[in-house]
Amino acid sequence: QVQLVESGGGLVQAGGSLRLSCAASGTIFSINLMGWYRQAPGKQRELVAAITSGGSTNYADSVKGRFTISRDNAKNTVHLQMNSLKPEDTAVYYCNINIPFGNLKGEHWGRGTQVTVSS
């Protein structure tokens, strides 16, 4: 089984910063795509940022220039540095990984971590 453990969420004032981390454990030989999604109350889950094993990144327009995604392939971890946070960034943030082959092939999700930005 794959376990994704997220950390780093919390309450911050507008303009502040948070760093989210996600560690994947299990018999994992390769992860091609790692990313962060978020879901605000009453809204659909949306992609925030994603990164390939080669380091290519993709960001939602709403976070470009403020958030930075990074990963450590050796440790199967992914991070999301969030700066200049806004109240509209308030949501539950979910870690997501895609394993391309093997018994654990497929998409896996973390349980989520709450990020609350006060105005």
Image: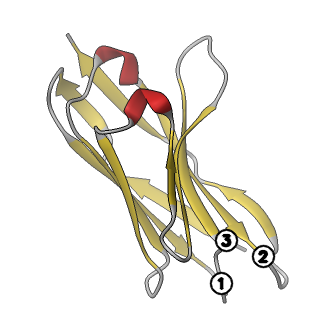
Residue 108 percent across, percent down from the top left: 70, 59
The answer to whether 78 is drawn above or below residue 81 in the figure is below
In the image: residue 35, left or right of residue 15: right
What residue sits right under mark 3 in the picture? 2
Residue 56 percent across, percent down from the top left: 51, 65
- In primary-sequence order, the first of circles 3 and 2 is 3
Q: Are marks 1 and 3 in contact (CB under 8 Å)?
A: no
Q: Are marks 3 and 2 in contact (CB under 8 Å)?
A: no
- In primary-sequence order, the first of circles 1 and 3 is 3
* Residue type of the residue flagged with mark 2: Pro
Q: Residue at x 38, y 24 (%)?
A: 89
- The kind of secondary structure element at disc 3 is loop
Label 3 – label 2 distance at C-alpha: 13 Å
Residue 92 percent across, percent down from the top left: 48, 32
What residue sits right under mark 2 in the picture? 100
In the image: residue 19, left or right of residue 79: left
In the image: residue 34, left or right of residue 101: left
- Residue 30: mark in rendering: 1
Residue 30 percent across, percent down from the top left: 65, 84
* Residue type of the residue flagged with mark 1: Ser
Q: Quadrant of the N terminus?
A: bottom right
* Residue type of the residue flagged with mark 3: Val
Q: Are marks 1 and 2 in contact (CB under 8 Å)?
A: yes
The answer to whether 86 is drawn above or below residue 95 in the figure is above
The answer to whether 87 is drawn above or below residue 23 in the figure is above
Given this view, does label 1 or label 3 mark the residue nearer the observer? 1
Q: Quadrant of residue 119?
A: top left
- Residue 45: mark in rendering: none
Along the line of sight, the residue nearer the viewer: 61 or 77: 61
